[in-house]
């Protein structure tokens, strides 16, 4: 095992716990209170002689208020304790009309000077922030010399011929290789700068790059031993070492899973079942489909704006031949977003609650529907409501499974998975730091072992966890090979079969793979199921037959051969 020397796990754990406690405590304060921490910030913002400055940080998938400071005679001050340097934001007034700054806060004497209406401020006194500014300057120079990295996708989309499209795609590959070389060279040339750990860290925790842990270990090698005990650097190495351990565990994870081969069942009558948003299966192998009467890509107002039209959802019961046996309309608060079924054939319909919100930016007011919570409704197969309850801590229900007496719900907004008592909705625990993308976050649960597999498409990986949140396996990286996940972000869905094999689903283009002890293999004969960056629901029955949902082409069944 290729582990890296860092501070002890105990020391790092205590530092993280301390930071979490500080953020939690500060988030409840309406005004800044004396904390006597090592972070001392003094600031001035030209154009403000009085007012209130808010300090916030992004924690557990949402912005948390750390405190507020009053401006007196044009100056303000903050004092906190940051065991690990943390990116924070300061703001006065409305975004776009007031003042805003984002920087790395650490236990040091720091200063900030800004100007009303400007997002550019001068920050001094922090080692990590100084490194961030040097890196920002270097990347700006690279872009000025080599061009905008974000223009390729629009050019590919606008290409009029396949030949033109292929040429632009080849240019994009060359550009991406060049910028990766720049990142690695920057680390090599700045081995004693703690900020370079962030270049690796973002690739471990997001879709930036999508490399494997083994590849990123090579990136991290030049970082000097003298700074590896710095908390900011140690945090990255701790995550890297953990991923190296779990990434090496895929062979063991599927060691007992024999190869499974599939063919598309052309006799299956699934084409009529369009606009299916999510799937579940009953104990008699009948499929449960959550479908919409208005199309599945308009239900969450993803393109902004207030929608007035009614939202109608149905639950369909469909037999293994594709015939609809029953359906009932979902009468519930919010927008139905996913479903699950338990061993007694109770059907759990999860809804996302919305609230109209108005926001102002540069003097313009925008009205949109904000996701503010999630609720669960339990029905029998005849559509009779058995129970309902709110789900604490969730703002957006995007995936659901039942394991014994537990209801598991993924939340793309918070990048988390909540585990609840399935009878009353009481929160048991939360698995955090999942990697959604494009409003997609799905997962599956092994029905026997209770092991969770999350389709962390934002990092091009599948990650496995115990019910207690311990990571047990991780596999995947960005690429086009059989062991890779391609496109903007993938996989969008994952399913554990009864024999232990793992099914992954990718979009744009559609690829279905089976991971077993024989390695990864494609399921042949699958047509393109979605256009663009959308979720493809997957489910399997007791015989390990696979069902996939396409908004326009209906349900597709793949049978074991």
Image (cartoon, grey):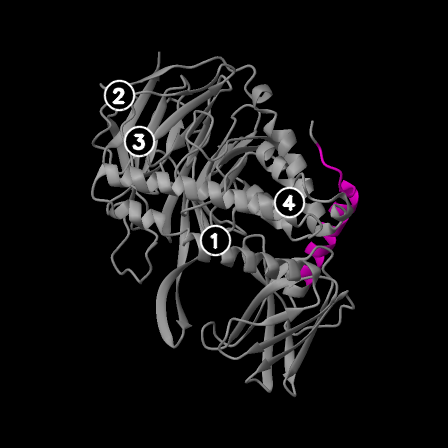
Which secondary structure, mark 2? loop
Residue bearing mark 1: 395
Circles 4, 1 touching at the beta carbon (< 8 Å)? no
Marks 4 and 1, how far apart at CA: 42 Å
Residue bearing mark 3: 317
Which image quadrant is residue 524 in? top left
Which secondary structure, mark 3? strand
Name the front one of labels 3 and 4. 4
Q: Which residues are magenta?
A: 3-25
> Which callout, 2 or 1, points at the residue further toward the start of the chain?
2
> Which callout, 4 or 1, points at the residue further toward the start of the chain?
4
> Relative to the observer, which residue lies in front, 270 or 33?
33
Name the front one of labels 3 and 1. 1
Which secondary structure, mark 4? helix
Marks 2 and 3, how far apart at CA: 12 Å
Say the numbered circle drawn on residue 188: 4
Name the front one of labels 2 and 4. 4
Residue drawn at x 30%, y 48% is 155
Lateral position of residue 323 relative to residue 386, left or right = left
Residue bearing mark 2: 321
């Amino acid at each position: 095992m290729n582990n890296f020397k860092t501070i002890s796990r105990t020391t790092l754990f205590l530092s993280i716990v301390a930071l979490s406690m500080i953020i939690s405590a500060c988030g409840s304060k309406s005004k800044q209170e004396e904390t006597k921490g090592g972070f001392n910030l003094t600031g001035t913002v030209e154009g403000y002689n009085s007012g209130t400055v808010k300090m916030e940080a992004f924690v557990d998938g949402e912005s948390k208020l750390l405190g507020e400071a009053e401006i007196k005679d044009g100056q303000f001050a903050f004092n906190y304790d940051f065991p690990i340097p943390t990116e924070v934001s300061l703001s006065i007034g409305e975004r776009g009309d007031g003042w805003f700054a984002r920087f790395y806060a650490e236990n040091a004497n720091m200063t900030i000077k800004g100007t009303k209406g400007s997002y550019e401020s001068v920050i001094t006194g922090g080692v990590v922030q100084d490194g961030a500014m040097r890196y920002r300057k270097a990347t700006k120079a690279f872009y000025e010399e080599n061009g905008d990295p974000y223009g390729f996708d629009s050019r590919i989309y606008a290409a009029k011929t396949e030949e033109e499209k292929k040429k632009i795609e080849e240019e994009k590959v060359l550009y991406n290789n060049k910028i990766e070389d720049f990142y690695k060279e920057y680390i090599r040339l700045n081995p004693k700068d703690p900020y370079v750990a962030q270049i690796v860290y973002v690739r471990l925790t997001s879709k930036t790059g999508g490399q494997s842990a083994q590849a990123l270990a090579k990136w991290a090698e030049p970082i000097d031993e003298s700074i590896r005990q710095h908390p900011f650097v140690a945090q990255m190495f701790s995550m890297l070492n953990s991923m190296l351990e779990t990434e090496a565990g895929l062979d063991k994870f599927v060691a007992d899973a024999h190869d499974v081969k599939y063919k598309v069942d052309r006799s299956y009558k699934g084409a009529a079942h369009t606009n299916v948003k999510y799937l579940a299966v009953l104990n008699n192998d009948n499929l449960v489909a959550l479908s919409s009467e208005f199309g599945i890509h308009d239900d969450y107002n993803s393109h902004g704006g207030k929608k007035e039209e009614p939202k109608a959802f149905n639950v369909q019961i469909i037999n293994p031949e594709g015939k609809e046996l029953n359906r009932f309309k979902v009468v519930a608060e919010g927008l139905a977003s996913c479903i699950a079924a338990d061993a007694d054939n109770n059907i759990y319909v999860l809804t996302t609650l919305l609230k109209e919100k108005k926001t102002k930016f540069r003097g313009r007011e925008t009205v949109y529907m904000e996701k503010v919570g999630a609720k669960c409704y339990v029905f029998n197969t005849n559509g009779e409501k058995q129970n309902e309850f709110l789900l604490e801590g969730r703002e957006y229900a995007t995936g659901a499974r039942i394991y014994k007496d537990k209801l598991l719900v993924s939340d793309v907004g918070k990048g988390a998975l909540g585990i609840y008592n399935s009878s009353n909705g009481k929160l048991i625990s939360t698995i955090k730091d999942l990697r959604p993308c494009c409003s997609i976050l799905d997962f599956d649960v092994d029905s026997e072992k209770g092991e969770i597999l999350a389709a962390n498409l934002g990092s091009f990986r599948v990650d496995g966890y115990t019910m207690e949140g311990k990571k047990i396996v991780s596999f995947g990286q960005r690429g086009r090979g059989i062991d890779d996940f391609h496109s903007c972000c993938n996989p969008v869905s994952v399913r554990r079969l009864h024999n232990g094999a793992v099914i992954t689903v990718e979009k744009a283009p559609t690829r279905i793979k089976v991971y077993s002890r024989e390695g990864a293999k494609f399921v042949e004969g699958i047509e393109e199921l979605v256009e663009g960056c959308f979720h493809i629901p997957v489910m399997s029955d007791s015989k390990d037959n696979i069902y996939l949902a396409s908004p326009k082409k209906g349900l597709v069944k793949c049978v074991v051969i």
